[in-house]
Amino acid sequence: MIKRRFSSLFTILFILLFTISASAQSGVGNSSSYLTYGIVAIAALLFLAVIVFVSDNLLMLQAKRMGVDEDGSNYSIFPKVADNTSGDFVEGALPDDEGKTHDLKQGFDIPIQGIAENIIADDIQVNTFAVQPPNFKGISPIPKVVVEVGDEVKAGDHLFFDKKNPDVKYVAPVSGEVIAVNRGAKRAITEVVILADKEQKFRSYNVPNYESCTRKELVNFLLDSGAWIHFTQRPFGVTPGITDVPENIFISTFDTAPLAPDLDFIIDGNGEAFQRGLDVLTKLTLGNVHLGMDGRVGPKNPYVSPVYKEAKNVKKHWFTGQHPIGNVGVQIHHIDPIAPSSKVWTLSVQDVLTIGDLFLIGQYNAKRTIALTGAELGKPRYVETYIGAKIEDLLKGQIEGENTRIIAGDVLSGRTKTMDGFLNFHDDQVTVMAEGNEVAFLGWLNPFKGKPSVSKTYPLGLFGDMKFRADTNTNGERRAFVVTGQYEKVLPMDIMPQALMKAILANDFEKMEGLGIHELVEEDIAICEFVCTSKQPLQKILRQGLDFVQEQG
């Protein structure tokens, strides 16, 4: 706390001294006097600041010693606005079962430009779609493809299945002609590509009554219809096995990643399908369906959709703080942490809509509202399309910059794509950023160049509401993996991420389990990768550890 405040103070004093020196150089005969007075003034301010900050620290220590405050951070000469408001509820919100919101202190909202405006583009037409086997962790590199190039398919028709789990079907998101089955290294299948019909056709289903059918009948229908692959099972972030029964199911109703889509906007008008999806999910779990709700108050979140607030047959849990509080993994950690033997399922809001429509209208509706984001786009906005849309169709004529990078997903956990690539199965966002491959004057040493950073070293960082035109430059290369304590400041989980990463690199199975690897997937650790001084590929390291633990059984 004190270190952070001193950092801000020294930044201000540096600017003040620089200004005084410049004024002294511009004066004719009073430069010596200006400089002397300036140094005396700075010394006086510094002495006063030391007295105030020491007093502030003593106040916090005394509060902690008396047991008034657990860590002393809420008692200060300098009241923090976030601490005074973060426990409030949005209008109509209710506390969770524990009688409080989950007010998380760690985290960081990355302030970058290019958020999508809440309008649906009517001038973007996507014609080509693909289902990509590598999107599903654990599937065989060469699944059994049941269609051929030239075949006509309807939305919901089977495209391929995993040879290890033949009951799990992967289906077409749209109707049309299969125009390619693309292969990669070692002839692994990378894409099954479909040229969509202008008028969509849907496969017919004999939809069971979810209220009266057995769980086995319900599971068989979800497997055959393709809805099963919308579930992600933790630990490991894999598609569930056909005999797996989740202890609980978790859904986050808000996303706090950089430039993330507004899920309140997306859910508007889809309340019936969302509720039907929730009703179906309650039949699949031994426990409960949990909704992670956005409990922040202020201009960043002035509204929570009544679709979420009025949802029935679920348990609602409210969260306040900064990113990554919107990550379902963080929410699970604070609601019901995952043990090594646990099995829980997660899915997105739009996945719930797909399941709801399946039981409501009897169609596999893979429609997705995608946020086109990034400062390099002329008009960041939303487009209605389907799962696996082609990047070129989405962005043709939309990019204004020349030297750019296309990311399927957000800038923290998304994947780089080319114009001839496709959105991944779970993507609801495309981000376009400037490449950071140009040499900048003074590089990261330039204190006046605005860039998103957790550090208060940059003077522009003192302006909390400022958003930056970011690029992909990492401002440094990979270095020695040193202990900094940075990860713990931005990850609101009772986990020691740096110790866990080192345990993974050492292939220490027992330490990995003891340090909570089962609670994490890549998106949870992505914010730690952003702040990492050592520039370590933490998401890649984590996946290496998850695969190792899963192989050990």
Image: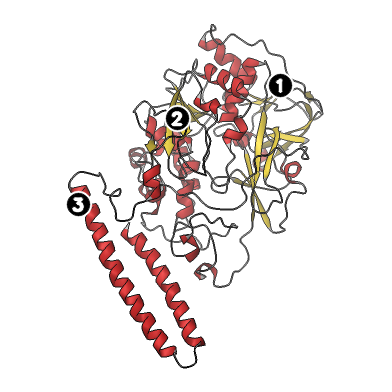
Of callouts 3 and 1, the N-terminal one:
3
Number of other residues with Cα within 10 Å of mark 1, as a class: few under 14, some 14 to 19, many 20 or more:
many
Residue 305: x %, y % from top left = 55, 30
Number of other residues with Cα within 10 Å of mark 2, as a class: few under 14, some 14 to 19, many 20 or more:
some
In the foreground, 197 or 186: 197
Disc 3, SS: helix
Residue 416: x %, y % from top left = 63, 48
The amino acid beneath tag 1 is Asp
> Would you name the residue on which mark 2 appears?
93
What mark, if any, has residue 302 been given in the picture?
none
> Would you name the residue on which mark 1 appears?
157
Residue 498 position (above or below residue 31)? above
Residue drawn 29% across the image and 56% down it:
77
Disc 2, SS: loop
Answer with left or right where residue 280 lies relative to residue 130: left
In the foreground, 373 or 548: 373
In the foreground, 358 or 345: 358
Q: Give the residue at the far left of this rendering.
A: 66
Residue drawn 40% across the image and 39% down it:
517
Disc 1, SS: loop
Q: Foreground mark, 2 or 3?
A: 2
Q: Can residue 408 be seen in this view?
A: yes
Of callouts 2 and 3, the N-terminal one:
3
Residue 106: x %, y % from top left = 39, 47
Quadrant in the picture for the C terminus: top left
Of callouts 1 and 2, the N-terminal one:
2
Q: How far apart are marks 2 and 3 (CA)?
A: 35 Å
Answer with left or right where residue 87 lies relative to residue 374: left
> Would you name the residue on which mark 3 appears?
62
Labelled pair 2, 3 in contact (Cβ < 8 Å): no
